[in-house]
Every structure is written in structure tokens, then in C-alpha cells.
Amino acid sequence: MRSHELLREVFQKTSPKQVAAELGLSLSMIYKWAEPDEGTGSGTANPLDRVEALLRCTNDTRLVQWICQRAGGFFILNPKINRPHPSYLIPATNEIVQEFADLLAVIANAAADNQITPKEAQKIRARWEVLKSVTEGFVACCENGNFSELKEHPPGLAAKN
């Protein structure tokens, strides 16, 4: 889906007039965001296109992570999978189990004194992010029938603390 198409759908649920008022922009500008900007349309570069351009020129996914956190979620980069090789299924499954065990160990150590310090919370968050990434890679491999990428580049090993 293209950005202007998404905005058009969003504006069916949220009034463009309300968006214009809250952002301090003209209503015509908001409507232009929902039009194609291909030289032939009268649209203008909308915020989604600008964020995409910023991501492309910086190549820094922290921008996306920040937006996801503001929306109450998180960002996990999809793994690149090229060639099928189902023989790595068992090691990939074991890696998820190990990452989950590592997360539980960090949680148990942090909670041993019935309190969690900010530093301990950071360690828990870091292990959780690794587990999510490893699991997402596994799920993507399941969907594509390809486990060679997990064998060649195990996502959890580089990120361990």
C-alpha cells in the first residue's frame, strides 16, 4: 500500500479537519497528503514519505523503533532469506529455547531481591529484544521453508550481553 492510500484510509476514520487543527496545518495540506505525488497528481510529500526518506538516507532503524515505541509496540527487522535448507530446523528451535532460558535467567537474577533496578530493567529489555528477533527470524524461516540463514547468521549470538 502506498503512503497516500494509507492516509486516505486513515482519514476515513479520523477527520482531516481534526488532524489539520491538531497539527496546526491547513486542511488543504492534509488533503494533499492523501493524493499521489507523482508529478501528475496534486499531492505533496506527506509525513510518511518523509519518514521513509529519512530512514533511507540515514539507514538507522532507531527512527522506526522510536515510532513503534510511541505507538505502544516494537520494531523487529525481517530477516533476509534466500535459499531453502530445512536441515537447520532443530538447531533453530533450540536457539529460541536457549534465548528464552537466557531471558528467564536475567529476570530471575533481577527479581531475586524483590526489586528491579533501572540497570536490571535495561538488561531484561535487551534480552527480550534478542528473543523477539531470534523468534521472528525463526517464524519467517518457517513461512519461507528456509533455515540456512539461521545457520549462517544466528541472530542471537551477536547481541548477547
Image (spheres, helix red, strand yellow):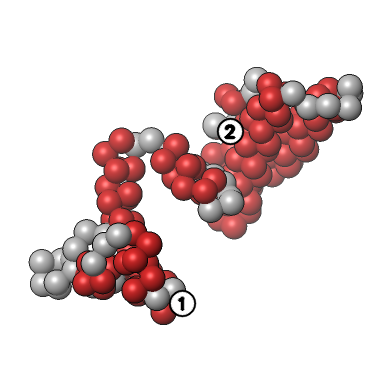
Q: Quadrant of residue 107?
A: top right
Task: Identify the disc placed on residue 148.
Answer: none
**Residue 17 placed where, x, y %?**
34, 74
**In this orientation, which residue lies closer to the viewer: 41 or 22?**
22
Crowd class of label 1 (few under 14; some 14 to 19; many from 20; radius 10 Å): few
116 to the left or right of 145: right
* Residue that extends furthest to the bottom in the rendered view of this protein: 12
Q: Residue at x 34, y 37 (%)?
A: 59
Number of numbered discs on residues:
2
Q: Residue at x 83, y 27 (%)?
A: 115
Q: Quadrant of residue 132?
A: top right
Q: Which residue is mark 2?
A: 155
Q: Amino acid at mark 2?
A: Pro
Q: Nearer the viewer, mark 1 or mark 2?
A: 1
**In this orientation, which residue lies closer to the viewer: 28 or 126?**
28
Whole-angstrom CA distance, mark 1 to mark 2, is 39 Å
Q: Which residue is mark 1?
A: 13
82 to the left or right of 59: right
**Residue 40 placed where, x, y %?**
10, 72
**Residue 30 placed where, x, y %?**
27, 68
Q: Quarter of the image containing the C terminus?
A: top right
**Residue 106 placed where, x, y %?**
78, 26
Q: Earlier in the sequence, mark 1 or mark 2?
A: 1
Q: Amino acid at mark 1?
A: Lys
58 to the left or right of 105: left
